[in-house]
Amino acid sequence: MQNYRRFYKTLAIAAKQMHTDRDEYKRSLVSGYTNGRTEHLHEMTEKEYETMCEALEALTGNTYQRDRRKARSEVLRLMQQMGIDTTDWSRVDLFCKDRRIAGKAFKLLTLEELMALKPKLRKIERMKKEKKEKERYSMMEQERYSVERECYCDDFENLNINVN
């Protein structure tokens, strides 16, 4: 773990609600969830960290996980609309790992990254539709031109011009 934004965001809310010193509260929380093994976040296991964050979020009413789950669902829906098989996680990850999309696997995306990804996917889909519309219009123009050309040639051939 390298990013503790989730914890510190919730900790600030909890410390304010409980009218306590943030650093002291952090040390007591970490110590409590590691059974006294450490007071440092970076020495916690992934499971201890998740458990502590979930409990702290429940205490404060912070909705990070719920919001992240909702954003993940919205992003998957957008991917599905783009034609990506969202039942195949390897395809979803391959798409997300493209540096132009997210640059990392889908499961590693934070709430902020998911929120930034939604407008990007909508823009890609919009550009795809515009391209199809342009191609359709271009084909219609070509058909119209060929029909006009045929009519013009027919009219020209029907003219009985004697050139002497």
Image: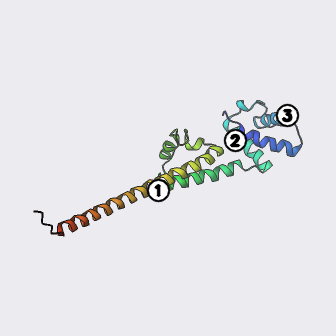
Density class for disc 2 (Cα within 10 Å; few <14, some 14-19, many ≥20) is some
Q: Is residue 157 placed above or below 81 in the rendered structure?
A: below
> From mark 1 to mark 3, how far is it between C-alphas?
55 Å
Q: Are marks 2 and 3 in contact (CB under 8 Å)?
A: no
**Taking the image as drawn, is residue 45 in sight?**
yes
Mark sitting earlier along the chain (2/3): 3
> From mark 2 to mark 3, how far is it between C-alphas?
20 Å
Disc 1 on helix, strand or loop? Answer: helix
Residue in the image at 68% along x and 48% along y: 65
Camera-nearest residue between 148 and 76: 148
* Quadrant position of residue 12: top right
Specify the label residue 50 is tagged with. Answer: 2
* Left or right: 81 in relation to 22: left
Q: Amino acid at mark 2?
A: Glu
Specify the label residue 15 is tagged with. Answer: none
Type of colouring = rainbow
Residue placed under numbered mark 1 in the picture: 129
Rendered-image quadrant of the N terminus: top right
Mark sitting earlier along the chain (1/3): 3
Q: Of circles 1 and 2, which is in front?
A: 1
Q: Are marks 1 and 3 in contact (CB under 8 Å)?
A: no
* Left or right: 155 in relation to 162: right
Q: Is residue 122 placed above or below 144 in the rendered structure?
A: above
Rendered-image quadrant of the C terminus: bottom left
Residue placed under numbered mark 3 in the picture: 24
Measured as percent of width and height from the top left, residue 36 is found at 79, 32
Measured as percent of width and height from the top left, residue 96 is found at 52, 43
